[in-house]
Image (cartoon, grey):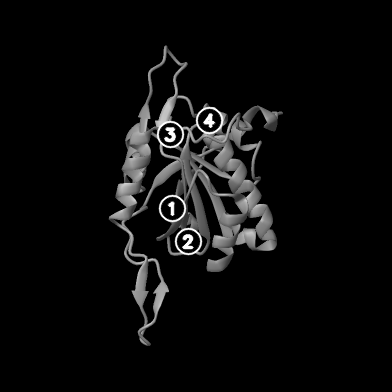
Amino acid sequence: MIDPRRYLPRSRAAYVSLAAALFLTLALAGLVVWRDVDQRGLGEETVGAALVGGAFALIDQDGNARRDSDFRGRFMLVYFGFTYCPDACPLALSTMTAALAALGPDAERVVPVFITVDPARDTPSRLKEYAAAFHPGLVMLTGDADALAAVAKAYRVYAKRAEGAGEDYQMDHSSILYLMGPDGLFMTHFDGSASAEAVAAAIRKRL
């Protein structure tokens, strides 16, 4: 049985380079329409036509084929990372787990999803072992390198292998939680500094 303490973050510093953060910030800033005007002429927050997210066909931690359409009718809370990540990924998944716990019964309407950026090492069995430290409903996804690269591109995710000898390498990647609506469309995102309470409040507002 995996020891959850093994995956607790050693610091709250996000494991992401300045280039990764800038890349994602610019991408999202140019793609999301945050405000609209209703028929009364009052400004209100809306999602708009955001080009973030899209279809995927991947493999979960049990070896089953999973598509984005499997989760229609429920919200998805999506994170891209890798299981050998020293701090940002376990922090994000801990935040996700705590946010869902704070939602209580409403958490049944949200699917937590982890998509690896390191398919060479993140096999289904490895993902299943890792998932045991976090939310019991966590869906861990992997696939071939091309399929994962396409999903990362659709979500505007930065991911690049860093220097390292043999199998002992790290992945530089953006650390963002994405909230996708029941229709599969992008709703909002949270950076690595977001608290579980803030994530839960933002989800509850949209339920």
Graded by Cα atoms within 10 Å as few (under 14), some (14 to 19) or many (20 or more), the crowding at tag 1 reads some
Q: Quadrant of the N terminus?
A: top right
SS at circle 1: helix
Q: Tell me what residue is drawn at x 36 percent, y 70 percent.
A: 35
Q: Residue 46 location in percent, x, y?
A: 40, 69
Residue kind at label 2, given as amino acid type: Arg
Q: Which tag, 4 or 1, sits closer to the chain's start? A: 1
Q: Give the image location of residue 102, x and y in percent.
A: 67, 56
Q: Looking at the image, is mark 1 or mark 3 earlier in the sequence?
A: 3
Q: Marks 1 and 2: in contact by CB < 8 Å? A: yes
Q: Can residue 119 be seen in this view?
A: no
State which tag comes first along the sequence, 4 or 3. 3
Q: Do the residues labelled 3 and 2 touch (CB within 8 Å)?
A: no
Q: Quick one: 88 or 107, which is closer to the camera?
A: 88
Q: Which of marks 1 and 3 is in front?
A: 3
Check disc 4 and give the amino acid type: Thr
Nearer the observer: mark 4 or 3; the answer is 3
Q: Residue 72 carries which label?
A: 2
**Which amino acid type corresponds to the residue marked 1 in the rendered image?**
Asp
Label number found at residue 16: 3
Front position among marks 4 and 1 = 4
Residue 116 screen position, x and y as percent? 46, 36
Q: Name the residue under label 4.
A: 83
Q: Position of residue 151 (x, y in %)?
A: 36, 44
